[in-house]
Image (cartoon, rainbow, N blue to C red):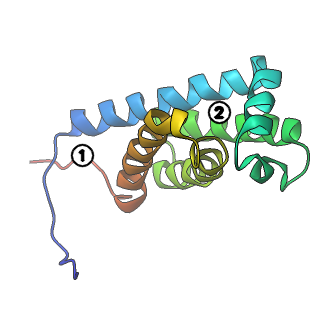
Amino acid sequence: MKFQEKTLEVSYKSVVILRIMLSLIFIVASTSHFFNTAKTVNRIEKANLGFIGSILGSPTTAVILSGIVMLIAAIALLIGFKTRIAALVLIAVLIPITLTIQVGQLSTLGPLFKNIALLGGLLFFSLNPNLKIQKQ
């Protein structure tokens, strides 16, 4: 399938609302990584693919580091600072989290597709780095 380069006008307000709403879930999730670290580590250890959470060290370290990275990138996305980079960083955090916690477990099918939808929103910002107000 070949994509042609086309442009599409979208409402600036809709892009700002999408950016804000998308960032909020990562801000909330990152705070959970800090305040519910043991619970999050327990979820990793019980997951079918929990070994992924141990690749970079202990699951506790992975939870804290991912929380820090997620919070910084989510705040950048929220305020519209380096949105493409922020989206790419969040994608890099979201994929291993999704693989570790949601993939291979029937009980997390809903959250799996929530993460797929989040990935779609992040791809929007990573594929459209030049979202600027056009003067008419």
Q: Quadrant of residue 31?
A: top right
Few, some or many C-alpha atoms within 10 Å of disc 2 (few <14, some 14-19, many ≥20)? many
Residue at left offset 35%, top offset 53%: 124
Please identify the residue farthest to the right as the structure is shown: 58
Q: Judge by depth and name the residue closer to the eye, 64 or 49.
A: 49
Quarter of the image with the N terminus is bottom left
Residue 59 left/right relative to 93:
right
- Proximity of marks 2 and 1: CB atoms separated by less than 8 Å: no
Residue 39 left/right relative to 72:
right
Residue at left offset 16%, top offset 40%: 11
Tell me where residue 103 appears, x and y as whole percent: 57, 48
Q: Judge by depth and name the residue closer to the eye, 14 or 135.
A: 14
Q: Judge by depth and name the residue closer to the eye, 30 or 133.
A: 30
**Amino acid at dot 2:** Leu
Kindly identify which residue carries mark 2: 71
Residue 28 left/right relative to 22:
right
Mark number, residue 133: 1
Tell me where residue 25 appears, x and y as whole percent: 50, 28
Tell me where residue 42 appears, x and y as whole percent: 79, 29
Please report whichever mark, 2 or 1, sits nearer to the chain's N-terminal start. 2
**Amino acid at dot 1:** Ile
Tell me where residue 115 appears, x and y as whole percent: 47, 42
Please identify the residue farthest to the front as the structure is shown: 106
* Element under disc 2: helix
Instruction: Please tell me whether residue 112 is drawn above or below residue 134 in the rendered image.
Output: above
Residue at left offset 83%, top offset 23%: 38
* Element under disc 1: loop
